Image (cartoon, helix red, strand yellow):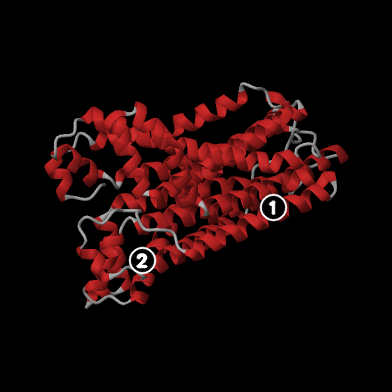
Amino acid sequence: MSVLRPTGLATAAVRSRPSALAGTFAALVLTATVVTACVALTVSASTAPPGAGPAARAQLAELSDMGIAFSQMMAYLGIFVIGQAMALAVAQRHRESALLRAIGAEPRQVRRMVAVEALGAALAALPVGYGLGALLGRFWLDGLSAHGMAPDGVSFRLGWQSPVTTASVLLVCAQLGGLIGGWRASRARPSAALAETLVQGGERAGTVRGTASLVALTGAVAMTVVAAAGPAEDAGEVIPAVVFAHLLAIGLAGPWIGRCTVALCAPVLRAFGGAPGELAEAGTRVRVRRLSAAITPVALVTAFGVTQVASFAGSGEGAGDWGAVFGTLLYVGFAGLVAANTLVMLTLERLREFSLLRAVGAERHQIVRTVAAEGAIVTVAGVGAGVAAGCAVMLPLGTRVGAPLSGVPVWAWPAVALCGAVLVGVSSGAPLLRMLRVRPMDGLTRHSS
């Protein structure tokens, strides 16, 4: 049957739930944009302008090193966030995958379907991200030149390295994400297609994931110890990689972090949240695996924010160093957009749930309060995990690079928490307002889009 061919399956899946692929597409575009800009900076700094002296060549060497470091870090982050977005998009179609299994699709066909989806999304995102990356890279280089951090006469060049590197990163990230998502989708039981009351994200995390989280945490601690024992001049260069290692452990341990946070917040929600608070506590408890998908990107933003604030406070650079500020905005902005994209995806998948609540008598303001209470749980878990990761890295390494956590202003800590709360609130609330305009009966009979 043609419907069981991978291309046909992928096309039908995208048409049935376009919002899921849209989230993956957005993550791919963001990654392509930043990777293109970073590689373009390296390419532009590889050729000295005519008559450049030793000082200018030294500046170009620093710019080249900066571009390479950013490119490597963005490649790691790209694998992380695209893999998560792709796995989430596939997980949102768990019942559809089970239905395909029920009508005769083999596991390998489901895996190939997901691989085709990932390839199509990467190919579609590549030209968009490449164009935006060219604009971002030119703005970056112009800003460096205007602030005396790049020699006069250096020209912006994309070279052949930019499209090749960006395409390679996108394809590898998309296929790795598709591999993870496809493996889970191919294991969907055909009987799940008949379970109308199946809770999305209610599956318990297995022992494999638990073991992997412990291994990742052990590796992150080992990297921190090695970096703290190594030369001080090398510690600053490895801080982003060490932060990423801790975030990988947080991502794998997300279900357990979510479960602990729900237990911590439950007494407060029951005492002061009323019926919406109790509903939020019960809902997040049974959807704890989905909750982990929201915790990780919020922790990503927070951890990078903590490390960069500590670096600024310790070095005294402040806002005067344009390159440092732009680099911080690049990391935190990328992480923030990824977090917003994930939270929007998680909210959009709940159209049927919210419509059912309204059909049985829930008011719009009650649903809004319920989502706000759930957002508070996500904020506590994500910001808490991110602060823990940032402190775990900067406590042993911050002093060695001249950026101790003791130098961070007191106001910075509540500011980080407030930023996390605003990110979660806006990203969850914006799609919710649109979904509440859908009539309950219509929402019960169609997918989110």
Q: Please, what secondary structure does the residue beneath circle 2 have?
A: helix
Using a 10 Å C-alpha cutoff, classify the residue at mark 2 as few (fewer than 14 neighbours), some (14 to 19) or many (20 or more). many
When the figure is inspected, residue 90 is found, relative to residue 19, above or below; the finding is below
The amino acid on which the numbered mark 2 sits, given as a three-letter code, is Ala
The percent position of residue 165, horizontal first and vertical second, equals 59, 58
| Viewer-side residue, 280 vs 352 | 280
Q: In the figure, is residue 367 to the left or right of 268? A: left
The percent position of residue 341, horizontal first and vertical second, equals 42, 43
When the figure is inspected, residue 366 is found, relative to residue 244, above or below; the finding is above
Q: In the figure, is residue 45 to the left or right of 434? A: right
When the figure is inspected, residue 392 is found, relative to residue 221, above or below; the finding is above
**Label located before the other in sequence (1 or 2):** 2
Query: Can residue 174 be seen?
Result: yes
Q: Which residue is mark 2?
A: 185
Q: Which residue is mark 1?
A: 221
The amino acid on which the numbered mark 1 sits, given as a three-letter code, is Val
| Viewer-side residue, 202 vs 85 | 202
Q: Please, what secondary structure does the residue beneath circle 1 have?
A: helix
Q: Residue at x 70, y 25 (%)?
A: 318
Q: Residue at x 69, y 50 (%)?
A: 68
The percent position of residue 415, horizontal first and vertical second, equals 56, 25
| Quadrant housing residue 414 | top right
When the figure is inspected, residue 259 is found, relative to residue 380, above or below; the finding is below
Quadrant of the drawing holding the N terminus: bottom left
Using a 10 Å C-alpha cutoff, classify the residue at mark 1 as few (fewer than 14 neighbours), some (14 to 19) or many (20 or more). some
Q: Residue furthest left?
A: 441
